[in-house]
Amino acid sequence: MLTAKNCKASAAVQYFTDYYDPGQTRWFGKGAAELGLVGEIDRESFEHICYGRSPDGSKYLGTKGDPDKRRAGTDFTFSAPKSVSLTALVGGDTRLENAHRLAVEKTLALIESRYAQTRITKDKKVAEVKTGSLVVAQFDHIESRELDPHLHNHALVLNLTQAENGKWYANDNDLIFQNKKHLGTIYQAYLAAEVKRLGYEIEPRPHGMFEIKGYKLENLIEFSKRRMQILAQCSANSTWQTREDSWDRTRKHKKHITSTELKAWWQKEASDLGIEIVKAGVPTVAQPISSLIAQHYIDDAIAHCSERSVDFRVEDIEKFVIAQRLPLDIADIKSLCNARPDLIKLDRNYTTFKAQIQAEVSDSAADGIALRLPQRAFHQAEPTLRERIQVEPLLDNVNESEAELDKQVGVRIPTHGGGVRVPISREDELDTTPVR
């Protein structure tokens, strides 16, 4: 699960520097590395960064702003399934803690490469600019506010990003928020793959979530007092946003108890309740899949998405892959899509030439077979793809006989600036003379 909340500098400094054992904090991101922030987090440099200053406090990075109003960053909280928390923290399998951290960092890497951006004003025009640079402060926690075992990570994505020109700007987190639920399922998918690799069986749950197989539901509920507290504030079929609001309203101040004391307490509680901790089986080694099989999976995803919409995003492809639990690395999907000659890239979306034709045929059936295909999409298609345009795919859509279609000189594709003409004769030549 992934929740998110914006933080002011004063609140971030107070909350995130109260207490941490060695190894529980770390910096992440290209922006952090550029500032020399690596390894464990120290209070002084963290405080400077929260207030928009350089790590040594000698200068401001980007716009100074009002320190009392300035957004320090966004706290993204990655929470492991309860069965993973029990097995790791009560059962003592520390490999699961490492698996959780790895899944978090893989998700953060995707966020940085895809969604890190800023707004830059030039000549009184504001443009959204991708930066691929984040400064992230990570903090590990093992307990909930009700002191249940709750393995989770606070990833504070700071309000700083560096553009290609070397300057620092405020980080625009709109895209991250828009895709927050999807990013939560990506984290779960990465974690599930690691859990299986360690030798555990998993049971799929709705929304891309899972649990380790072998626990009774009541076992998980016994150690989920915080979750029960949240659900008591809202209905069983409430939305994620409603539950997040309830989570925020019912937060208590955290008590500090050492991890050794907590784990001893949890082990006694599990023993008193008769809960048997699931043991791992034989670890497995993930077998790489061939590029041919990978493209077959992408074929299925494209077919699924294009049946539902003329254009779709890479996130839609990823959602299909995760829902079907296909053995693809989420980080590879975008490059696999970009390498496809049958996919046409339109801004942040993809479309297929076939999907465009089929959609436009139904819209223009009353006018014969005039197809309104955007000229940009047509010319962005691979030449070999344009040459492969045939009459046959149109027959089922327009209900014309092949003989009648042969009488036509061509199919007019209106565009903003005139049009292109797609031949429907048996000749292979493509006439691109503008139609007037």
Image (tube, grey):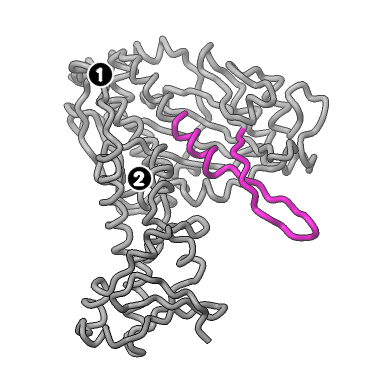
Quadrant in the picture for residue 291 = top left
For marks 2 and 1 on the same chain, the one whose residue lies earlier in the sequence = 2
Q: Which residues are magenta?
A: 105-134
The image quadrant that residue 20 belongs to is top right
Say left or right for 61 vs 46.
Answer: right
Nearer to the camera, 98 or 324: 324
> Would residue 178 appear left or right of 93 to someone viewing this image?
right
Query: Mark 2 — residue?
Result: 232
Q: CA distance from mark 2 to mark 1?
A: 24 Å
- Residue name at image x 54 percent, y 42 percent: 5
Q: Is residue 49 visible?
A: yes
Whole-percent x, y for residue 272 in the image: 22, 17
Q: Nearer the viewer, mark 2 or mark 1?
A: 1
Write down the quadrant of residue 217 in the picture.
top left
Name the secondary structure under disc 2.
loop
Q: Amino acid at mark 1?
A: Ala
Mark 2 residue type: Ala
Residue 270 got which mark? 1
**Which sits in the foreground, 230 or 427?**
427
